[in-house]
Structures are given as structure tokens and as C-alpha cells.
Image (cartoon, rainbow, N blue to C red):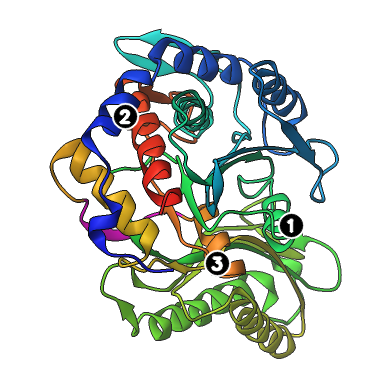
Amino acid sequence: MSVSNSALTLASSQYRQIAKAVNEERLINTATRLMSVHSPTGQCGEVADLLAELLSDEGFQVQRIEANHSAAPAVIVRHVGRNPGRCLQFEGHLDTVHLPFVPPAQVDGRLTGTGAADMKAGIAAAVEALRVIRELDLLTHGSVLLTAHDLHESPWGDGRQLNSMIEAGLHGDGVLIPEYFQDFLPIVGRGGLIWRVALHRAGENVHEVMRPNEPGVVLAASELIQRLSKWDREIGIARDPLAGPGSVFVGQIHAGELYNQFPTTATLEGTCRWLPGVTSASVEQRFSQILSALANEYSITGEVQFSPMRDAFRLDPNDDLTVAFQSVIMRDSGRNLTHGAKPFVDDGNAFWALAGIPAITHGPIAGGAHTLEEWVQIDSLVCVARRYACTAVQYCNL
């Protein structure tokens, strides 16, 4: 359903009600409780249980769904308005990267610690938005779906829990994702995967003066890099105005135990990224073809392992969700967000690739993601909660 832009304008009284109702202390308490539980990817059972208990204690009906990950069933909450309508989903991941745990703290208007930026504090802001929507009873139509899951962060997670939920139809008509990004509105993003190659030759590791008369795995690795570089140049010809080109990147190469050893194995690792219209399956197929040809020519064996991140995505700037969200941004800040390309891959890519669902990545001002020095601005969390609640009222009430 498409509507006029005028129908997507939030009443001033509703905006003021929502802004007043967002409870900073409650929001920070929620974020701190979630961040107090260490939950590296694949190990989110305890923090998922905590979130489910927190929401249940507040009177929400909580559903738990394994979705191919019995160790940490996803947390599902749905708040339904007074009449049927469309559904807006608040979606986030509870897992953090595999780094030493840093407990939460408040310092100079910031919340610090593991998950501050990526992205437990963002989930807390979405939870606060859901509370406000229920308390004010402003949802005359539709519903808001809150989901939180594990297995997001690569390479430890493969996204299968969220993917299973999407494929089973457990999703909204539009999605807001509170990842640490609000500089502009990302309407396009590249897909990405991590690849790992192992090249093997027959025989044993030997001193280089005793090596057999063959090229060996180091030279084969060098040739593989050249062929991947050629492929990188080829796919770089096609460029998206915002996202730029696809790419093939080599980041690591390892072989041997000493400088004068003729090794039996060389390993390489890197990434592939691609634009909308290209699939991960086609990228994996092309990579495998390049590796297979090389292995035959150099009389070696080659093995490749792919760790998918997410597929590419594109967001229609004229979609009702986008227009509703931008009108909230205008109300809140006096300006629209400019369009840009998402610099990373996140769960929004999966919604578009698997089900064609529009998903907007917009979260708090934060930094230090994937480091030991994560932080998020507290007033920015309040802003995100306000914007999410306002967007839900506009989008669902149409």
C-alpha cells in the first residue's frame, strides 16, 4: 500500500507525548542489564533469557523460537494495536564479537563496555520505544514486532537464526535496526563473505635446498593472488553511484615454519563484496572455478571455505517506511537524512535479499565497535527510542 506524504505526518501532540514518555533512566537500566551478561556469538542463551524475563515481568507476551539455534532461542514480542494493519519490526542481535569482556559503566554522558555500540544498547532503545508505544496507546492500527537473536557476528555466526525466522515468515512489513549508524540514510549496501583457502602439495615439509622440482604452494598462492586481483579489476568496472564497486580482497597469506622451508601448505584469507543484482552463490561459484583451474595447473589441491556475511540490498527512497521515517527525522532534527551506502553488512541486507522487505539501519551515536573500547552516547539512545516510537505510530497507523 502506498500513501501520500501528508498522511505520514506525525501530529505535534503525539510527538510531544512520545518525547516526554521516553524514560532515560529505565532505558539505561535495560542497556546496563543486557551488557552485564557476556554473550559472544553462539553463546547468547543467558542474555536472551534475561531479556525475555525482563519483558515478561513488564507484562509483555514473550515468545521463544529456536530457529535452528537451540542454545539460544530468539526473543519475540508483539504489541498489537486496536485495529488490523501493517507491522513494523524492531530487530537486533544480542551477540558480541569474541573479545575479552568489558563490564558496563557510565562515563561523561556515555555508556561504555561490551555491547555498548554493537548493539545491546541499541536493543534497549528499541525496547524503550516499545514500552512507550504501549503506555501511550497510540497504536490505533497494526502492530510492532520486537525480535532479538544470536549468530550475527562473522565469522563465528552464519546468520542462520535470523534467516530461518525470515524464511518462516516471522517478520514485519518494514524493519528498523538500531545498529550504530545515523550519519545518513543507507539505501544501498554491498553483500559480503569471508573466504579461506588452503593449498596443499604432496610430500613433506623439507629444507629448500632439498625441494622437489615443482612450483610449490607459495608460488601457487602468489598466482592465486594475481588471478583474484584480475577478477577484482573486472568487477570494479561496474559501480553503484553510492556503494561503489564490488571487490575481491586478499588480507592474509601464511606458509611454512621457517624462511628456508619448502612447505606443504599455504593458506590465504580475504573477502568478496558485491552489488545488488549479484548473488552470493554466483560469487562462490566464480571463486571456486578460479581455484580449481589453479590447482589443476600447479598439480596441487585447493580447498575453500566460505563464511557468508550478508547479501547485497537496496532500499526504495519512496517506500512508505522510508518516507515515514524521514518525516520523523525532519520533525526531530529539522532536516532529512541524505542518502548514502551502508559501509558494513548487517541484518537489513538479509531482510531485503530473502523477502524483499525494506529495512532501515539507524541507531545511536557510538564508537569502538569490535574493540575493547565500545561506547554509546546516552542522549543519542534516548533519541533513537523517540524516533522508533514515532515511526511506529506513523507507519502502523496508516
Secondary structure state at the residue bearing disc 3: loop
Rendered-image quadrant of the C terminus: bottom left
Location of mark 2 (residue): 383
Disc 3 marks a residue whose amino acid type is Asp
Q: Nearer the viewer, residue 7 or 181?
A: 7
The structure residue drawn at horizontal position 52% and vertical position 64%, both measured from the top left corner, is: 357
Tag shown at residue 311? 3
Residue 256 in view, yes or no = no
| Residue on which disc 1 sits | 164
Residue 295 location, quadrant:
bottom right
**Closer to the camera, 189 or 289?**
189
Left or right of residue 74: residue 322: left
Q: Is residue 81 magenta?
A: no
**Residue at 23% across, 57% down:** 6
Left or right of 39: which side holds 114? left
Q: What distance separates the C-alpha of mark 3 from that of mark 2?
A: 29 Å
Pointer 1 or 2: first along the chain = 1
Where residue 156 appears, x then y in whole percent? 69, 45
Q: Secondary structure at mark 2?
A: helix
Say above or below: 362 vs 310. above
Q: Mark 1 or 2, which is nearer the eye?
A: 2
Considering only order in the chain, which callout, 3 or 1, is on the residue closer to the N terminus?
1
Q: Are marks 3 and 2 in contact (CB under 8 Å)?
A: no
- Amino acid bearing label 1: Ser
Q: Nearer the viewer, mark 1 or mark 3?
A: 1
**Residue situated in front as seen by the camera: 327 or 243:** 327
Q: Tell me if mark 1 has few (under 14), some (14-19) or many (20+) residues whose alpha carbon lies within 10 angstroms of its own.
A: some
Q: CA distance from mark 1 to mark 3?
A: 15 Å
Query: What is the secondary structure assignment of the residue under circle 1?
Result: helix
